[in-house]
Amino acid sequence: MYRKFLTLVLIAGSLGLVLFVKSFLFEQPKTPSLLDRLPSADFLAKANILELAKETNSMLQYNKLSMRDFTTYEFLLGQGKQYGIDLESNLYLFANENGNWGALIRLTDSSKIHVGLERLAKFAVIQDSTVGGNTFYFIRKEQSFIHYGKDYAFIYQGNDFIRMLNHVVSAHYGSQQRIWKQFLKQKQFKDEHLVIFTNWRKLKQYDIQTAMFAHDSDSLGFRLKSYIKKRTPLYFSLKSTGLGYRSDFQTERLIDVHLDIKEFKKHKQDSVYVQLEKLSRKIGFPFERFVTAWNGDLVYKEGGKQVQEVRYIETILDEDFNETEIERSRYDTIPGFSVLASLNRSAPQLISRLIHKGLLREDAGGYRFLFSPLLHFQKVGSYYQYFSTPRSPKMVRRKKSQVIWKYNGTKYHFSIDKLTRYEIYGSLQIPVRSILKRNKLI
């Protein structure tokens, strides 16, 4: 009886071992996910096309764009189903500083992709080729490529397609790149529909660990929210208040900075200090002396026109060809120009240094910064200001640090919203109406 029982146990154990080894040796490999196929790059992004369409619809409708009916949620969803593209899932994009970029998106039915390629062939010359048994389609002139598998489509533009294709098709389950893991586990902008992430090597010179951007929009334009995380502490913070200039419809450029820099002055080895000093050195600006004298408020405003009297000496000849110098005056139209800075007791040494380097010079009873118009000077408490208007611009209390910059007829507005010990939160407002007009879209 004992021998029979032992025999049964051995047989059962052997059978279990055989089944375990068989399942291990002959287990079907798991299919790599879309995330496993993504290559590393300088810039990464994820986007939900349908949710973006919902978000931007009010802007397209408000500006009455002719294409607005082709970018609605319903239309795009129908197009995705027609061509077997899963637009309800995220699209993943990557790009490098050399301009090469690519994208991967899920497919619901890869057999329908050919319908889309045939339609695309009506607008461009599409060729096909095969490498390593993998077929791809390309537009040679544009260096644009398309490859698709059973459950994904890979789009690429650039000069490194074959290497990227090999990475995509040879990926295995669980081989997700480390940088994509870092990106997708970020808590910042987790619920946004378009997010950009970068650990670009050039950011290291500023000791920046991560930079992220997210998209918002309303009927008037886009808002690009930004988040920057440093490896080392920020040695400056936002001031609770400071004096600045008011922005109006004539303002074309405004730099409005109000920072507490007491700690910043003590850390000359800080990456921000070092890089600003390098930039200043290119134009001979005495950055170290400026920081010593600066109290943290700096405002530059440009915009509008001013009429300014300019006196000059003209040499004339009399009847006997004798030269005579006569002082004359003329009225020139010049751009409105104002500079304001809060300075401490070291201000005279800074101004003397600027004059010595030729960055600031006295001229005709006023001052000029390089090629600026003739400026008047006024000191109000610890604030030094230079301005082209007959009277000093009105100063107002400001809490926000911001930049307004007009370029090609569009005013871009960047603001620093929050500073922590290691983080910077900001936002960039981009009004779209002037951009659409310039490109003749409305």
Image (cartoon, rainbow, N blue to C red):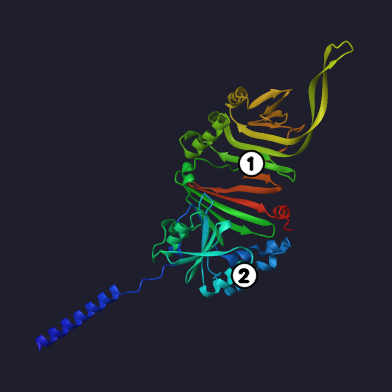
Residue 436 x, y percent position in the rendering: 71, 55
Asked whether the beta carbons under mark 2 and mark 1 sit within 8 Å of each other, the answer is: no
Residue pointed to by mark 1? 256
Choose top left, top right, bottom left or bottom right for residue 57. Answer: bottom right
Mark 2 or mark 1: which is in front?
A: 2
**Eyeballing the image, is 115 above or below 422?**
below
In the rendered view, does 7 fall on the left or right side of 441?
left
Q: Position of residue 371 (x, y in %)?
A: 68, 30
Residue farthest along the right direction in this orientation? 319
Does residue 263 appear in this view? no
The residue shown at (39%, 62%) is 175
- The residue type indicated by label 2 comes to Leu
Q: Is residue 261 above or below residue 89?
A: above
Residue 71: image location, x then y, percent: 65, 66
Element under disc 1? strand
- Could you say which is closer to the camera, residue 59 or residue 19? 19
In the image, 249: left or right of 324?
A: left
**Residue at 72% over, 64% down:** 66
Label 2: which residue?
Answer: 76
In the rendered image, residue 262, in percent from the top left (x then y), is placed at: 52, 36
Q: Quadrant of the C terminus?
A: bottom right
Residue 132 higher or lower than 294, as above or below: below
Label 2 or label 1, whichever comes before in sequence order:
2
Q: Could you classify mark 2 by the number of other residues whose Cα lies within 10 Å: few (under 14), some (14-19), or many (20 or more)?
A: some
C-alpha separation, residue under disc 2 versus residue under disc 1: 42 Å
Q: Helix or strand or loop: what does disc 2 sit on?
A: helix
